[in-house]
Amino acid sequence: MKNLANNHFFENLFDQSNIPSIIWNREFKIIRINVAFEKLTGRKATSVVGKSIEILFPKSSLNVTLQRIRKAETGCRLEDAEIDVIHENGFVNTVIFNSTPILDDTGETRIATLAQGQNVTKHKKAENELERLHQQKELILGSVSEGVLGLDLDGNHTFVNPAAAKMLGYEPEELIGLHSHSTWHHTKANGSLYPKDDCPIYKTFLDAKTHSRTNEVFWRKNGTSFPVEFASIPMYEQQKLIGAVVTFTDITERKNAENALKQSEQNMKAFVIDSLLCIYFFNTETKKIVYANPSFCELLGYSPEEIETLTIYNFLNHSKKSVDAFVNHVVQTKQRNIGERQWKRKDGTMIHMFVNASHGDHNDSKIIYISAQDISVRKQAERELKESEHFLKESQKVSKIGSYVLDIFTGKWNASEELDKVFGISAIDDHTIERWLSVIHPEHSKMMDDYFKSEVIEKKLRFDKEYKILNQKTQEKRWVHGMGELELDTNNVPVKMIGTIQDITERKIAQQKIIESENKFRSVLQSAKDSIILVNEKGCIVFWNNFAEKIFGYTEKEIVGKPLSIIIPKEFSAAHKQKFGQHVSKNSEPLKDKLSDLLGLKKNGSTFPIEISLSHWTNENKKFYCGIIRDITDRKNAEEEQINHIKKLSEIAFLQSHQVRRPIASILGLTSLFVFDKPSDPLNSEVISRVEIAAKELDIVIREIVEKTNEIGKPKSFEG
C-alpha cells in the first residue's frame, strides 16, 4: 500500500490529469508541462520546454509572481497561490497553484519544482454570472472553450455555441435546424458510414442516459475530420425528455502530446502524493483499493489504514450493477473514460466528482487508475444557472414572448434574446425608441408613436396594444401584442417601463381563417335551395337563410333571436317545447337525427306541410340544432290526387270484372268440347262459332273499360 506504482503508472497520471501541471529546474527553465497545462496556456510543450517561466505570466504581474516563486524555492512551497497565467492568444487565466520540490537521489538537494494548479477563471466567471442573475434576473450563458450543441428529439440543432461552430467550420446560425448526425457525425474515422442507430448521441434520445466517447471523429464543413471527446447528456423540461446537450473538445493536440510526453517515477510520485486531485487505483477483479493518495483519504474522511479495507462499492454511490458495468466497459475497451460520479463520504454525505478513469496492467493484475475532482460547488452553481436560464429562455421561447426594460429618459431598452428574435434584430443593434419605431410596419408606425406619447407617457396609462411589425431579418409582416407597466418617481414622472412583447401572428392568422370560414359557411347556407335554420339550446333562432325567408315570410333581421315556436302552429307548440327541453337536458343522445313531415306556420298565419331534416352538434358543452326544411305542399297535393285516381280505377275494375269473367268462362268451357282427334266433326264447327261470338263480346267489354278509364284522366306527377 505504501509503495507507489512504477513510472508508467505515474506518467499516465501526469499526462492524463485534468489539473494543469508544470516542472521547472533551478534556473526557472521549463522542463515539462502536461496536456491540461497546454490547454491553459495555448502553448505546446515543444514550444515552451527550455524557456524561462517568465513567458507564462502577464507583464502587469510578472515581478510579483516571480518574487512569490523565488520565495517558494527557498523552502516555502506555493500553497493555494492565486497566479495569473497568460494564454498565447493574450487572455489571462487565474490559477491556484501548489508546488512541491523534486529532490535528487539523496533526497537532500532540490533539482526541480513541480507545480500544479486549478484554473478558477471559469469558477469566477460563474460566480459573477450567478450574482448578476440574482440582481437582474437575466441570464446569458458565458462562452466556453468546449463545443456545446443543443439538439431536439429529432437530432436537429437548437443551440450552437461559437466554439462548436468554429471547430466544425460553420457560423452558428448555419447549423440551427440542421440534422446533427448527417452534418458532422455521419462517417467513422476509417471512412465507413456511421449508422444513426449506433450513434451514442442518438441513444441518449432512446434511453435518456448520458453517453460519452473519446475515440470518435466529427466532420467539418470543408470535409475534413478531427478527433473529439464528447458527452451526450439528456435534457429535460418539466421531467419530460426534450433533447440532449452535446459537449465536445477537439483533442488533436492532446492526442499528439500524449504520444510524445513521458515522465519519471519521481515526478509522478510527487504529483500523486501532493496532487489536489483524488487519485486511487483499484483491482478490477477484487474491486479493492490498492493505492489512494492523501487528497482521496482527506476528502472521504478515511485513514490510510481504513482505505486498505475498502472496495469501490463502499464509497461509489451507484448500484453494484452500474459499477460493475462501468468497470467491465473500461477493461474491455482499454480506453480512457471520463464522466461525473457521485461519491459517499464516511459520514454519509454525498459529493459530486468529475472522474477520469484509465486502464492498465500492474503485477499481472487488472488495474484501473482513477483521478477525480470535487465539483460539488460548481455543480450547484451550474444547476442554479441552468434552471434559471432554462426557465427564462424556454418559457419565452415556447410562448414567443420577449421581455424588455425601457429607460424613459434615455429612450434605450434592454431586451431578452427572444424579443430580438421577434423583431429580427441582433443583440448588438441599437435598442432605442427610434429603432422600435423603425421596426413597426408603416401602416401602424404613426399610430404607435402617437399612442406611446399621448396615451402611455402623458396619461400614464398601461401600454397594451396589438400592432404590426416588419421582422428586420426576414422582412416578414408579423403581428405582436405589446404590454408594459410604467414606473414613476416620487414626482409621479415616468422613469421606466417594464413589459413584454408577444408574437401573435399565428393567432391573427387563425382568427382570419375562422372569419373566412364563417363567411364561406354563411354564403353556402344562404345560397342553398332549401330553408336552413340554426337554433341554440335555448330554442332561439341564430341563423335564417334566404330560402327560409321565402317560404315563411320572415326576414333574417325579424326572426333571429326569436323562439323556434314562432314557425310552429299553436296546437303543436307545447309538445315541441317539452320534447326540445328533454333533448337538451339529457347528457346522452336518445334522439337520432331523422326526416319528419310536420306543419309549418307562416308569418301571415297560414299553415302548410313541411318536411324537416334534423341534426345537432355540441360545441363547448353547448348544443346546437340544424333544420333543413322543404315546403311539400305540391307534393302533398300530388299524392292526394294520385290516391283519388287509384280509388276511381278500383271502382271501374270492380264494376267490370264480372263482365270480363263471363265471356272468358264461356271460351274456356267451349274449348273443353272441342274434338281434337276428329277435326272434321260438325261439333267442332259449332264450338269455333260460339268461341268467336264470346271473343267479340270480350273485346267489347275491354273497350268499354278503356273508355271509362280515359274519362278519369291522367294523374299529375310530383317531383320532390
Image (spheres, grey):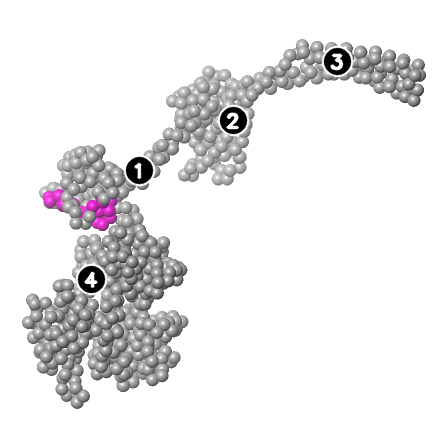
Figure check: 521 above or below 221: above
For the C terminus, the quadrant is: top right
- Which residue is located at x 64 percent, y 16 percent? 644
Q: Please state if 100 lies on the left or on the right of 612 as rendered.
A: left
Question: In terms of sequence position, does the residue under pointer 4 or pointer 2 come before the other?
Answer: 4
Residue with the mark numbered 4: 126
Q: CA distance from mark 2 to mark 3?
A: 46 Å
Question: In terms of sequence position, does the residue under pointer 2 or pointer 1 come before the other?
Answer: 1
Q: Nearer the viewer, mark 1 or mark 3?
A: 3
Residue with the mark numbered 3: 702
Q: Amino acid at mark 3?
A: Ile
Residue with the mark numbered 2: 612
Residue with the mark numbered 1: 508
Q: CA distance from mark 1 to mark 3?
A: 80 Å
Figure check: 242 above or below 616: below
Percent x, y of residue 392: 25, 52
Q: Write down the quadrant of residue 3 in the picture.
A: bottom left
Question: In terms of sequence position, does the residue under pointer 4 or pointer 3 come before the other?
Answer: 4
For the residue pair 214 and 483, the one nearer the viewer reads as 214
- Which residue is located at x 32 percent, y 78 percent? 360
Residue located farthest toward the bottom when viewing the structure as drawn:
106
Percent x, y of residue 245: 30, 59
Q: Secondary structure at mark 2?
A: strand
Q: Magenta segment range? A: 404-425
Q: Amino acid at mark 1?
A: Lys
Question: In terms of sequence position, does the residue under pointer 1 or pointer 3 come before the other?
Answer: 1
Residue contact between numbered discs 1 and 3, judged by CB atoms under 8 Å: no
Q: Secondary structure at mark 4?
A: helix
